[in-house]
Amino acid sequence: MKELSDLPIGIIDSGVGGLTVMDELLKRMPNEQFLYIGDDARCPYGNRSPQEVAKFTFELISALNDFGVKMVVIACNTATAFALEHVRPLFDFPIIGVIEPGARTAVEKSVTNQIVVLGTSGTVKSQAYDQAILTLAPDASVRGLACPEFVPIVERGVYKLEEADRVVEQTLAQLADETFDAVILGCTHFPLLSHFIRKHLPIGTELITSGSATADTTIRILDELQLNRESLTEPQSIFYTTGNPAHFELIVKDWLHIANPVVEKLVL
């Protein structure tokens, strides 16, 4: 199993959002190597049809399969909602998503079982989080809020600016009359806006991201299949984007604090 165990873990997302999940994986699994594909050229996925999202997801995982990976993390909530069950039977390696881990964390941390899900229009319409949460906690109350302006802000790299703060404030104003104690960031782009999101939520609200729980699931699967990387050589991760590599590199450096990331253009 040595050769297989030394293969990288594949990560896919509609753009840079999955870097928030990769950040957690790098911290928890420092000896592993990763291949990341961000489909910036076709981002955002949230306004796409389920059929388009499933097609794009298959194409990205097929690219990872060609490179050679031992498992894949779909670090995109919209792709998890619309494509996970379709692509799992098509490949020989484990494929996991981010919705179930995020839902499980929210149920564990919420005291009142009144949970808000912030997501793309596609994720909210799919009600995938509602189903996952209600499976774990049938008496829970789930309120989905589509935040269509959040992903473009992150992809443009302006997630630290006043413009981002203003958009977040205007969006979350829709929750002013709601009662809840936990908010799921149901898009992997959204943690890059977490400082503004937290600012405009009631004090004490639990802010849930799926990164840590997704890392838990990844670690468990590698342990069960005895696929932990054995090589003692320095691990190296590679980033691919279907968009602008220079722009992508700036966000990788800012978010993952990697001085000289290897970022390459991917043509599908």
Image (cartoon, rainbow, N blue to C red):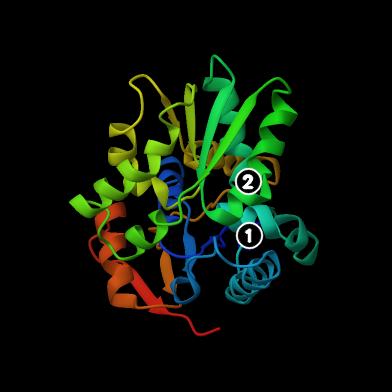
Secondary structure at badge 1 equals loop
> Badge 2: few (under 14), some or many (20 or more) residues near its Cα, within 10 Å?
some
Quadrant location of residue 64? bottom right
Q: Residue at x 52, y 33 (%)?
A: 116
Q: Earlier in the sequence, mark 1 or mark 2?
A: 1
Check disc 1 and report the residue beneath it: 70
Q: Is residue 59 above or below residue 208?
A: below
Q: Nearer the viewer, residue 161 or 226?
A: 161
State the image coordinates of residue 79 (x, y, percent, origin top left).
61, 59
The answer to whether residue 68 is seen in the rendering is yes
Q: Residue at x 41, y 68 (%)?
A: 239
**The C terminus: image quadrant:** bottom right
Check disc 2 and report the residue beneath it: 222
Task: From the viewer's perspective, tell me whether residue 58 is left or right of residue 153.
Answer: right
Callouts 1 and 2 close, C-beta under 8 Å: yes
Identity of the amino acid at label 1? Lys
Looking at the image, the residue that sits furthest to the top is 111
State the image coordinates of residue 30 (x, y, percent, origin top left).
41, 47
Identity of the amino acid at label 2? Leu
Q: Is residue 144 above or below residue 61?
A: above
Q: Nearer the viewer, residue 113 or 249?
A: 113
Q: Residue at x 66, y 31 (%)?
A: 133
State the image coordinates of residue 190 (x, y, percent, origin top left).
41, 48
The answer to whether residue 74 is seen in the rendering is no
Q: Residue at x 38, y 58 (%)?
A: 234
Mark-to-mark CA distance, 1 and 2: 9 Å
